[in-house]
Image: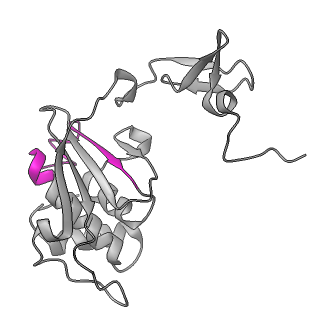
Amino acid sequence: MEKLDLNNYEQLLAVAGKFHGGSPCAGICIGTRMTMTALRRIGIGDPMGADRKKLIVFVEIDRCATDAIMALTGCKPGRRTMKVLDYGKMASTFINLETGKAVRVAASMKRKLNTGEGTPDLSGIPDEELFSIHDVEVQLHPEDMPGKPLRRVACARCGESVMDGRDEEVAGEFVCRPCATGQSYYRISN
């Protein structure tokens, strides 16, 4: 793949739209601009090349903007370089692992975007009108970093494997979070 020009909105929009599987929607447009803004501010110029091991992104929504960020940065949950926290917010935090600089970019409600039919033109709108932008600090732990699992335990209740400190100690036993809290997104049907 050719190196992306992180200042070329139209090129990036085309790449993100293709990855997403169609013509760019409003979420792809916002995610593209969000990525451009954040990478500039944390000093990442080649996220899929020379800088590929310097970047982790936390996304706060499981919608189209996340596809744009993934397409333009190469960050993925499977590589442990993208953390998906579905807060339902069109927001992301980009971290330069080499410098520790981190920025959170969130879609602003200050400007109403035309999200009807077609692709909204965000190319001429200043970052500060589109987004709330803040330098932030993110506490990363060794078990959050890319690479092989640092620790693996079997849940004392369900027996399933739990990796990288995502277990909890309850009454002297290591258990997965669903067993610890009694809450899960699924229920086993009989």
Question: Would you say residue 44 is visible in this rendering?
Answer: no
Where residue 172 sits in the image (x, y, percent)? 65, 9
Q: In the image, residue 83 lies at what x, y percent?
A: 39, 43
Going by the picture, which residue comes out furthest to the front? 110
Vertically, is 177 above or below 40? above
Image: magenta residue range: 39-60
Does residue 91 lie above or below 143 as drawn? below
Q: Residue at x 65, y 32 (%)?
A: 181
Position of the N terminus, as image quadrant, is bottom left
Q: How many marks?
A: 0
Question: Is 169 on the left or on the right of 79, as rendered?
Answer: right
Question: Which quarter of the figure has residue 65?
Answer: bottom left
Looking at the image, the residue that sits furthest to the bottom is 117
Is residue 124 shown in magenta?
A: no
Residue at 15% over, 31% down: 98
Q: Is residue 56 magenta?
A: yes
Residue at x 57%, y 23% (from the top left corner): 167
Q: Position of residue 164 (x, y in %)?
A: 48, 24
Q: Position of residue 26 (x, y in %)?
A: 33, 77
Residue nearer the viewer, 186 or 54: 186
Q: Is residue 141 above or below residue 23?
A: above
**Residue 133 left/right relative to 156:** left
Residue occupying the point 16% across, 60% down: 36
Q: Quadrant of residue 89?
A: bottom left
Can residue 40 be seen by looking at this rendering? yes
Q: Is residue 51 left or right of residue 90?
A: left
